[in-house]
Amino acid sequence: MGGSTTVAAATAPALEVRRESGQREVFCGLTSIVWLHRRMPDAFFLVVGSRTCAHLIQSAAGVMIFAEPRFGTAILGERDLAGLADANEELDRLVADLLQRRPEIRTLFLVGSCPSEVIKLDLAKAAERLNTRLAGQVRVLNYTGSGIETTFTQGEDQALLAMVPLMPRAPAAPAAEGAAPAAAQELLIVGTLADAVEDRLISLFGRMGIERVRSLPPRHSRDLPAIGPGTRVLLAQPFLSATARALTALGAQLISAPYPLGVEGSAAWMAAAAATFGLDDARVAAVLDPLVERGRRAVAPHREILEGKRLFLLPDSQLELSLARFLQRECGMELVEVGTPYLDRALLESELALLPAGTPLTEGQHVENQLDRVRAARPDLVVCGLGLANPLEAEGIATKWSIELVFSPIHGCDQAGDLAELFSRPLRRRNLLRFS
Ligand code: SF4
């Protein structure tokens, strides 16, 4: 196993980014199906892959596989892999069977995997073919969730990107120089949020004066929001680089803000939208101030446990920079190292500006080298994937499973206390179990 490490300057002059490559301990993009299928109950995700892919999704989905599943795997057999069978014909047959059994499906995602990519099965063509055949009944889209192309949350980015071409075009803004009048502007929240969190945020935006708020992905897969020069895009998740680029290419404007994790990040996120819409400061403050006050009170008991504790984040979901910012600034933790699988400086500009000077940032992974640094630093808490959590616990190092962060409602000021608790809990448990 080879690996390399280079150190390069980041945008913020005080922050350096170590770039690492080598063996990685991360999920592939297929995992994002687990939360995407819950968001769009009328969609089905058909992975075209191997038994390994089927096992991965089953283990990630856990007990959810016993509910009526809205995802599955078309397993490529040896005859497909050897090129003896026409994989396209088999796929068409399987899709026909599936749709006969499940007539309620409105959108079918064909999800590429490592095996389908390696045998160069053209899923874009397959989607085109099936779309013609199923016109009016089901819409077929395709994207890749393979481990070769995507890491964990990047699967969501690819799924949303596949939906962008189908979004209706909003009428062009009539105002000069491309500026849309406030009444023609629509706020588009991009990134999967828990339904209850989304409802709450939309009602808060409404109280601030933003009436037209839509979301991508929508709750009904066919109810896609319109996109155009009057659209103001507010990313709820930092891992949506490709989707953000595609939306801006269609004329939408991206609002630059920290991500809505923690009290400070969530308030700044909402305030950035309010500023873009030119809303009245007093009205915005009347909505935000009580939220901030309540959020801080909810975080306070967890800060007592977390303050001064040393934190090491291994790369996993691309949420790491926002989490590090929240845990350092609002919970008083000390950052030993902040790893991320991929660092999109344009989307993380506001987060980078809020991290303390000298924070060691790492992009990519060489897991053995990184574990050596964990062992040398002996941090109080390590945020990592399931594969590393138990081995590190066995070495006496407290861990927090990062996967919980993508399945739990953690966005917004109201959730800041719960978010802090996800990190204080393993430390509290450790104290409770300590025998003196
Ligand atoms: S897509 Fe690739 S990395 Fe993901 S489960 Fe399938 S084979 Fe493994």
Image: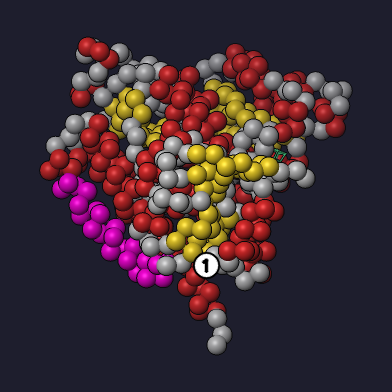
Is 187 on the left-hand or right-hand side of 65?
Answer: left
- Quadrant of image for the C terminus: bottom right
Q: What secondary structure is the magenta-colored segment mainly?
A: helix
Tally the numbered discs.
1
Residue at 23% from the left image edge and 58% from the top image edge:
293
**Percent x, y for residue 72?**
65, 38
Is 392 on the left-hand or right-hand side of 1?
Answer: left
Answer whether residue 292 is magenta in the image.
yes
Image quarter where ligand 1 lies:
top right
Above or below 177: residue 199:
below
Asked where in the image residue 116 lies, by quadrant, the reply is top right
Answer whether residue 366 is magenta in the image.
no
Above or below 188: residue 208:
below
Above or below 328: residue 275:
above
- Quadrant of image for the N terminus: top right
Residue at 31% from the left image edge and 53% from the top image edge:
263
Residue sitting nearer the eye, 249 or 59: 249
Which span is picked out in magenta? 285-307
Kindly identify the amino acid type of the residue bearing the numbered disc 1: Asp
Is 379 on the left-hand or right-hand side of 183?
Answer: right
Residue at 55% from the left image edge and 60% from the top image edge:
382
**Percent x, y for residue 129?**
64, 15
Secondary structure, mark 1, is loop
**Percent x, y for residue 101?**
63, 33
Q: Count residues near mark 1 (Cα–Cα under 10 Å), then give few for <14, some for 14-19, many for 20+.
A: some
Residue at 20% from the left image edge and 54% from the top image edge:
290
**Percent x, y for residue 324?**
45, 53
Residue 15 visible in this rendered orientation of the protein: yes
Q: Which residue is mark 1?
A: 380
